[in-house]
Image (cartoon, rainbow, N blue to C red):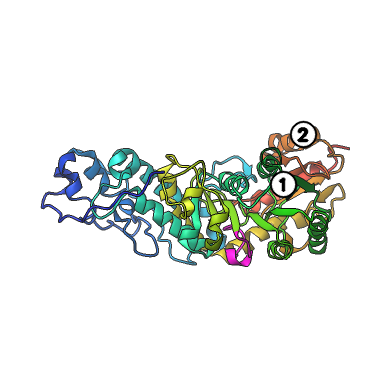
């Protein structure tokens, strides 16, 4: 990521048509001519909901190829056959129809990353082509009217801020949720040698490793505890209260909003308040919460949050986000001496360097898609898909569901164990059997104190038939390890 370059003033458009323009006069016209209108109702480029200065980027698929190619025979790619992304216009019953899904499998591993819906994938394709054609002419921000990487980057920040309800100056874009959270944890400035840092067995393994790094590199006392089973709200809060009481030197607490291992949704706001009352800061891992659960960051009460934008927001791979409350910016150190931004800018908390421009440029379209479905509707839909398979196997004695039967404590992700699944090897056998015999893709997860689990994660692209296939398979295979 590079320092922001000043924008050049907009120059009047020449009279020549775009196809007559070569590279020498490109800078005198880009950003000031209009693309031709769509030729039919089915040939529309989905535009951002709010007007912006990203005109070149949003019409690139129709017009920019001729501009940037510098040759009369330049061919524009086919127009995207997409839908307009107006808020609350995509019914959840039709949600799976927005995705191009590889046939022949029941993919219940959407927890890795989210498949892009068609409209987002098409925007990503156009943006990738634009970046490849325009290269440094675009990335170095020399185009008239301010079109370029800086304006696209700021638009992506603003769209994420709109999604989670905070200021754009409190959002930094990272390469992943793991990158964002690693920076928050390892660059937490108030920590001193001997201070306590706390994490849980249901936290993400990479984040547990970062907390342990604070012990080996910063002299912190690392305290780890196991989430109780059953993980009822009362049991969860009691476990956090207990670990805070027995760690009076605690300074930093890691809390995962939705466990990547079992799918447990923790009462984050209550835990953050509990920690704050004892002078303990909280870093929240919201990788599986943002854009799956319907909430705003203020609902968590936390000062530091990280998550993956390529998960439930359905943006391209290689996108994550960091939130730092503006009043706490000075408590997160800048990353590796990053001087591409002022020291009080949140972007200085992310390592400098070139990132996937096209992926970041596509974030606004992914956010528009989120609002086109609606946050509350998405949450209800995903909880419904989960309930469909879980309720269908409730009477199967050898299937243990690893989250409580409380809608506040789960959403899309839910893990299970089969009786006899006490080792990692046994969990691998279950995963392999489901795939080879039934073409159902799940993933086993270790690191849970009470034993490995099989994680089931339907995605926005999933259908009732996908989860029904799992329920049927479990009824047939529930005793496979006995």
Q: Magenta stretch? A: 290-303
| Residue furthest to the left | 15
* Residue 368 seen in this snapshot: no
Badge 2 element: helix
The residue carrying mark 2 is 429
Q: Position of residue 431 (x, y in %)?
A: 73, 37
- Mark 1 and mark 2 in contact? Answer it, CB < 8 Å: no
Q: Position of residue 415 (x, y in %)?
A: 74, 48
Who's the residue at 58% across and 61% down the image? 378
The image quadrant of residue 407 is: bottom right
* Residue 279 seen in this snapshot: yes
Q: Position of residue 346 (x, y in %)?
A: 49, 54
Quadrant holding the C terminus = top right
The residue carrying mark 1 is 261
Who's the residue at 43% across and 54% down the image? 156
Nearer to me, 105 or 452: 452
Who's the residue at 70% across and 45% down the image? 193
Residue 292 belongs to magenta span: yes
Left or right, 439 with respect to 154, comes to right
Nearer to me, 156 or 40: 156
Q: Say if 442 sits above or below 267 in the image.
A: above
Who's the residue at 55% across and 61% down the image? 325
């Amino acid at each position: 990521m590079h320092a922001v370059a000043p924008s050049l003033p907009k120059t009047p458009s020449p009279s020549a048509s775009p196809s007559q323009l070569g590279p020498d006069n490109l800078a005198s016209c880009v950003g000031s001519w209009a693309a031709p209108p769509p030729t039919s109702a089915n040939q529309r480029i989905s535009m951002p909901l709010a007007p912006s200065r990203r005109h070149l980027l949003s019409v690139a698929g129709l017009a920019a190829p001729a501009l940037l190619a510098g040759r009369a025979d330049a061919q524009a790619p086919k127009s995207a056959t997409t839908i307009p992304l107006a808020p609350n216009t995509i019914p959840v019953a039709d949600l799976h129809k927005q995705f191009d899904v590889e046939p022949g499998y029941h993919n219940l591993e959407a927890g890795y990353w989210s498949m892009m819906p068609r409209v987002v994938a098409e925007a990503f394709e156009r943006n990738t082509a634009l970046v490849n054609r325009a290269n440094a002419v675009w990335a170095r921000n020399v185009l008239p009217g301010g079109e370029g990487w800086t304006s696209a980057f700021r638009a992506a920040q603003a769209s994420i801020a709109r999604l989670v309800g905070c200021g754009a100056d409190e959002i930094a874009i990272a390469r992943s949720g793991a990158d964002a959270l690693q920076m928050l944890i390892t660059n937490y400035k108030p920590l001193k040698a001997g201070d306590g840092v706390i994490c849980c067995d249901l936290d993400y393994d990479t984040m547990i490793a970062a907390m342990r790094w604070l012990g080996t590199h910063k002299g912190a006392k690392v305290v780890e505890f196991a989430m109780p089973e059953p993980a009822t709200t009362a049991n969860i809060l009691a476990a956090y209260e207990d670990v805070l009481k027995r760690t009076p030197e605690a300074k930093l607490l890691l809390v995962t909003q939705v466990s990547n291992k079992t799918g447990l949704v923790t009462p984050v706001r209550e835990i953050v308040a509990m920690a704050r009352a004892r002078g303990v800061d909280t870093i929240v891992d919201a990788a599986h919460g943002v854009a799956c659960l319907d909430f705003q960051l203020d609902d968590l009460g936390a000062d530091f949050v990280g998550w993956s934008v390529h998960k439930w927001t359905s943006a391209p791979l290689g996108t994550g986000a960091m939130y730092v409350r503006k009043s706490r910016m000075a408590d997160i150190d800048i990353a590796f001496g990053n001087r591409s931004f002022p020291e009080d800018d949140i972007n200085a908390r992310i390592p400098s360097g070139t990132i996937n421009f096209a992926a970041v440029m596509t974030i606004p379209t992914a956010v528009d898609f989120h609002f086109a479905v609606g946050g509350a509707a998405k949450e209800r839909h995903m909880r419904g898909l989960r309930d469909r398979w879980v309720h269908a196997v409730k009477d199967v004695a050898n299937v243990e569901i690893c989250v409580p039967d409380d809608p506040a404590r789960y959403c899309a992700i839910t893990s299970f164990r089969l009786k006899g699944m006490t080792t990692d090897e046994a969990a691998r056998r279950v995963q392999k059997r489901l795939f080879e015999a039934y073409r159902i893709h799940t993933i086993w997860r270790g690191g849970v104190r009470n034993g490995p689990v099989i994680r089931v994660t339907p995605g926005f692209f999933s259908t009732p038939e996908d989860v029904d296939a799992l329920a049927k398979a479990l009824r047939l295979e529930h005793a496979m390890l006995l």
